[in-house]
Amino acid sequence: MCSDKKKIKVLFLCTGNSCRSQIAEGWARHLKGNIIDAYSAGIRPIGVSSRAIKVMAEAGVDISAQKSQHLVEFSEIDFDYVITLCDNAAENCPVFTGQAKVFHKSFEDPYFATGSEEDIMETFRKVRNNIKYFIEAMPNNLNDSDN
């Protein structure tokens, strides 16, 4: 039974902890909450994007209570995986003590999308869906050798 197993502790890390890592945390809690204890953080947190909240609500996932947090706020947690979701986070990811395996999976940053509001929201939806597919494959995809 799953409740007898220890959940995998996963930190999703990006630069601003505004969009991608918030979306990943939301999907992980929603889709894999029985096996994954999900967290998100940023190297330079800037607040949760209202568009990320909106696009996740469209998919039936409420991330409105999530907070944008700095990586240092999680220094006491012994993560199993730290997943960097952007190249900047991967390049600036600190060394984690303990058993944490760092895994890199870069996604487009919808925060910088341009065009009409509908164009921007379409970028957010595309990123949301790509992150969902990644989360759905967890934790098996974390053993891939292409990280």
Image (tube, rainbow, N blue to C red):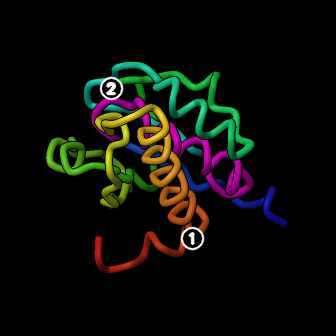
Kind of residue sitting beneath label 2? Val
Is 121 left or right of 46, judged from the image as shown?
Answer: right
Q: Nearer the viewer, residue 33 or 109?
A: 109
Residue 85 coordinates in the image, percent (x, y): 34, 50
Q: Which residue is mark 2?
A: 72
- Image label count: 2
Name the residue at 58% across, 30% down. Answer: 53
Q: What residue span does the magenta drawing correspond to?
A: 14-37
Rendered image quadrant of residue 136? bottom right
Identify the disc placed on residue 137.
1
What SS does tag 2 mark?
Answer: helix
Q: Which mark is residue 117?
A: none
Q: Residue at x 64, y 22 (%)?
A: 65
The structure residue drawn at horizontal position 55% and vertical position 67%, both measured from the top left corner, is 139
Residue nearest the viewer, comparing 140 with 86: 86
Identify the amino acid type marked 1. Answer: Ala
Q: CA distance from mark 1 to mark 2?
A: 28 Å
> Does the stretch in magenta take in 25?
yes
Is the C terminus in the top left, top right, bottom left or bottom right quadrant?
Answer: bottom left
Q: Is residue 5 above or below residue 113?
A: below
Pick the residue in front: 35 or 57.
Answer: 57
